[in-house]
Amino acid sequence: MGLLSFLKEKFSKKKTENIESYSEGMAKSRHNFSTKLNTLSKKYKKVNQEYFEELEEILIESDVGVKFALKVIDEVLEESKAKRITDSEEINEILIDHMFNQYMEKGEQVVDVRFVENGPTVLLVVGVNGVGKTTTIAKLAKRYLDRKKSVLLVAADTFRAGATEQLQIWADRLNIEIVKGEYNSDPSSVAYEGMSKAKRDNVDLVIVDVAGRLQSKQYLMDELSKMKRVISKVIPNAPHETFLIIDATTGQNGVVQAKAFAEVTDLTGVVITKMDGTSKGGIILAIRDELGVPVRFIGLGEKMEDLKEFDLESYIYGLCVEK
Ligand SMILES: Nc1nc2c(ncn2[C@@H]2O[C@H](COP(=O)(O)OP(=O)(O)OP(=O)(O)O)[C@@H](O)[C@H]2O)c(=O)[nH]1
Ligand SMILES: [Mg+2]
């Protein structure tokens, strides 16, 4: 049995809350991908060269990236030849299997922040303006507060007017403390202050909101390495996690951003926001393919509870199966 049949059976028996959110949040992506796939298999009962060309187009249009699309299609061709399969619906099942496996094979699967045993765990959150950093930080803070962890926020995004105030609003709502600097002050000194306070108060989790200004790679590298140096001076081995936030609606531009950040700093996770606002949900596969870094969470809406753990099975189901 292919993965798709397995998932249909699994989730039809038990509709988890997660699967409902994925199904709902990924409706646009599903319409773009799965509807086209079904139309294609109706057009070609038996597959041929043209079928695979159109399939490639569908994959690329869903933003999985050209490299990923070609790789997966090669695999599907090989398997279908070896097994002498020509039925297009069966081929589509094989395609989904390979998309899933590609993600799995790329590296580790991990979702939650990995907490260190002693002292504060430091999570850096980086990303360019407007991708959803601040709201994601608030959602993550809430998640760990609900799990009885103490959380401190550090507003090291001092470059955008209003960024600190926004984080302050969230800190007030969540009733947690925040360390912040003046507008345009040195982000590293805010981070230093934040780490000192985290250590003094022995908080469990410190989340640092960092501006990712992409003027040039050298600039970004200098900025991030200075920040990390300062942090590790106060808390050895920190930051323990660095999450990059990518806005799914930016498509291939998001992939370019991801590559740029990965080149200058060690990312331990990616959070993909605004999945509900895009029809190109393949971006998750593209980023995993390019970076190998695990997707930790995905944003499926603007509300607090819309930040979900990334689950590959739910994602594939959301992308492929009409409710
Ligand atoms: N639909 C949807 N909207 C989201 C999601 N995540 C964030 N947003 C919205 O995206 C907008 C920008 O979010 P912010 O958190 O302010 O982004 P930021 O990266 O901190 O932005 P700057 O501080 O301006 O650089 C807000 O209107 C959020 O409500 C999501 O998963 N789905
Ligand atoms: Mg912000």
Image (tube, helix red, strand yellow):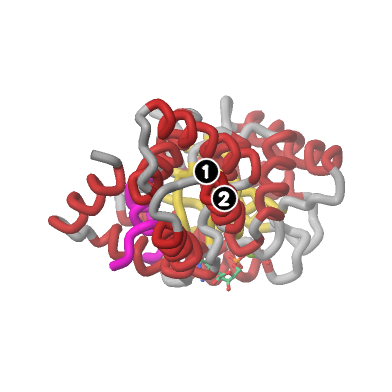
The tally of labels here is 2
Number of the front mark, 1 or 2: 2
Q: Relative to residue 280, is residue 218 depicted above or below?
A: above
Q: Nearer the viewer, residue 68 or 261?
A: 68
Task: Give percent across and percent down for residue 74.
Answer: 54, 33
Look at 68% across and 37% down and name the residue there.
Answer: 262
Precedes in sequence: disc 1 or disc 2: 2
Q: Relative to residue 119, is residue 33 depicted above or below?
A: below
For ligand 2, the image quadrant comes to: bottom right
Badge 1 is on which residue? 198
Rendered image: mark on residue 90: none
Task: Give percent across and percent down for residue 260.
Answer: 74, 42
Q: CA distance from mark 1 to mark 2?
A: 60 Å
Question: Residue 1: within the magenta?
Answer: no
Q: Which residues are magenta?
A: 305-323
What is the three-letter code of the residue carrying label 2? Glu
Disc 1 crowd, CA 10 A, few/some/many (<14, 14-19, 20+)? many
Q: Is residue 182 left or right of residue 191?
A: right
Quadrant position of residue 71: top right
On whether ligand 2 comes within 8 Å of the CB at mark 1, the answer is no
Does residue 144 appear in this view?
Answer: no
What is the three-letter code of the residue carrying label 1? Ala
Badge 2 is on which residue? 50
